Image: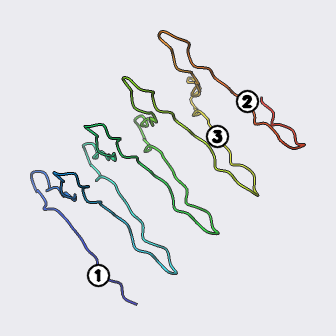
Amino acid sequence: AKVGGAVSVVSGAGTSSNSGGITVRTADVSSTGVSGALSMATGVSVKGNSGAVTLQSGGASTGSSGALSMATGPSTAKGNTGAVTLGSGLTASGTSGSMTLSTGSATSGNVGHISIMTGVSTSGTAGSISMHVGKTDKGHGGLVYLSAGSTTDSAKVGGAVSVVSGAGTSSNSGGITVRTADVSSTGVSGALS
């Protein structure tokens, strides 16, 4: 069996300078229209696996590897900025794909941080952060596991876990609620330890 031809778009090399860049974008719209969409996807497979999509910056032997940035465009008028949705695909009978968010490992240096935060608001309400497990009609509910890192160094301590409510400079600080869910039938509500 043969495969279809590949398509490669490669910028020019620079033996003693930078290699050329590649720009893929739709044109601007000067009137009230909408700029064109940009779609990147692999083809559908009837029987086998569909192709993967890999988006990464190049490696570096002595310097730092390039950063990877994904964001929606700004809104200079009164409109909202676009949302960013990152998720795995739906499945009819199998298991949906997992999602992993992690920093790279380090053999001798420090491991990078992961920051999940909403933006600052100067006059409105700051955005919320929600983390929850999906609902199931037959199986057990999924777990939410939050754990700090451990250490094998006898002179060091394990990582701490801090849950702090927001401060109110001229009002009350936010509350913290830790509780198990109510039970509507004859069961027993979960324990808290």
- Mark 1, other Cα within 10 Å: few <14 / some 14–19 / many ≥20: few
The residue carrying mark 2 is: 179
Circle 2 SS class: loop
Q: What residue is shown with label 1?
A: 5
Q: Is residue 123 above or below residue 150?
A: above
Q: Position of residue 190 (x, y in %)?
A: 80, 36
Q: Secondary structure at mark 3?
A: loop
Label at residue 145: 3
Q: Earlier in the sequence, mark 1 or mark 2?
A: 1
Residue 101 located left or right of residue 70: right
Q: Dot 3, how many residues are within 10 Å of its Cα: few (below 14), some (14-19), or many (20+)?
A: few
The mark lying in front, picked from 3 and 2, is 2
First in residue order: circle 1 vs circle 3: 1
Q: Residue at x 44, y 43 (%)?
A: 103
Q: Which image quarter: residue 33?
A: bottom left
Q: Please, what is the three-letter code of the amino acid marked with disc 2?
A: Arg
Under tag 1, what secondary structure?
A: loop
